[in-house]
Amino acid sequence: MNEYVLIVRIDRGALAPEQIPPIRAGWDVVLENWKARDQYVTSDLVIDEGYVITGAARAVAPGAVSGAGGAIVSTITLRAETIEAAVELAKVCPTLDYGGTVEVRERQIPAVPTAN
C-alpha cells in the first residue's frame, strides 16, 4: 500500500456557523470508516491563520495562503493501492458539500537507514 496526503481546503469566511456541526459530524463518520478499513494513517487540523513568509527578503505577514478552494484547513494521510483509489476515498470528504476542495498527492515515505 502507498500513502497519500489529502490537502483539504475551504473558504472559512463562506461558512455559516450552523454549517460547522454537520461538517464535523460528517468527518467523524468518514474517519471511523477509514480507520475500520485500516486506510487512515494520521491527520492534522489547521485551525488558525499563521504567518506567511515570502520572497528572498523573507517578508513576514500574518495570514494564510489562499487560492482556489480556500485556505488549507487540514491534511489527512491515507493508505491506498493507487492514487486513483485514494481519489475515490477523497470523494467522501464532507467539506466538498460546502464548496471545499481536496487535493490528493502521493506521500514519499522517508527512507529508513539500514543498520551496518
Image: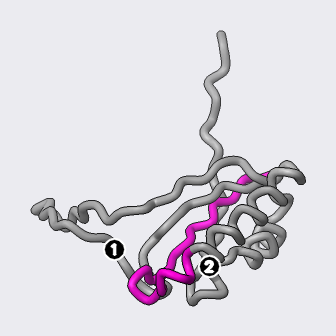
Q: Please, what is the three-letter code of the amino acid marked with disc 2?
A: Thr
Circle 2: element type:
helix
Circle 1: element type:
loop
| Residue 2 placement (x, y as % from top left) | 77, 53
Give whichever of discs 1 and 2 has the lower sequence position.
Answer: 1
Residue shown at the point (54%, 53%) measured from the top left: 44
| Residue 6 placement (x, y as % from top left) | 63, 65
Give the magenta range.
1-20
Extreme residue toward the right, this view: 37
Q: Is residue 14 magenta?
A: yes
Extreme residue toward the top, this view: 116
What's the CA distance linking mark 1 and mark 2?
Answer: 18 Å
| Residue 21 placement (x, y as % from top left) | 60, 73
Answer few, some or many: residues within 10 Å of disc 2's Cα (few below 14, many 20 plus, some between 14 and 19). Answer: many
User: What count of labels does the image hold?
Assistant: 2
Q: Is residue 60 left or right of residue 72?
A: left
Q: Is residue 113 magenta?
A: no
Which residue was labeled with disc 2? 95
Which residue was labeled with disc 1? 65
Tell me where residue 29 sits by quadrant.
Answer: bottom right
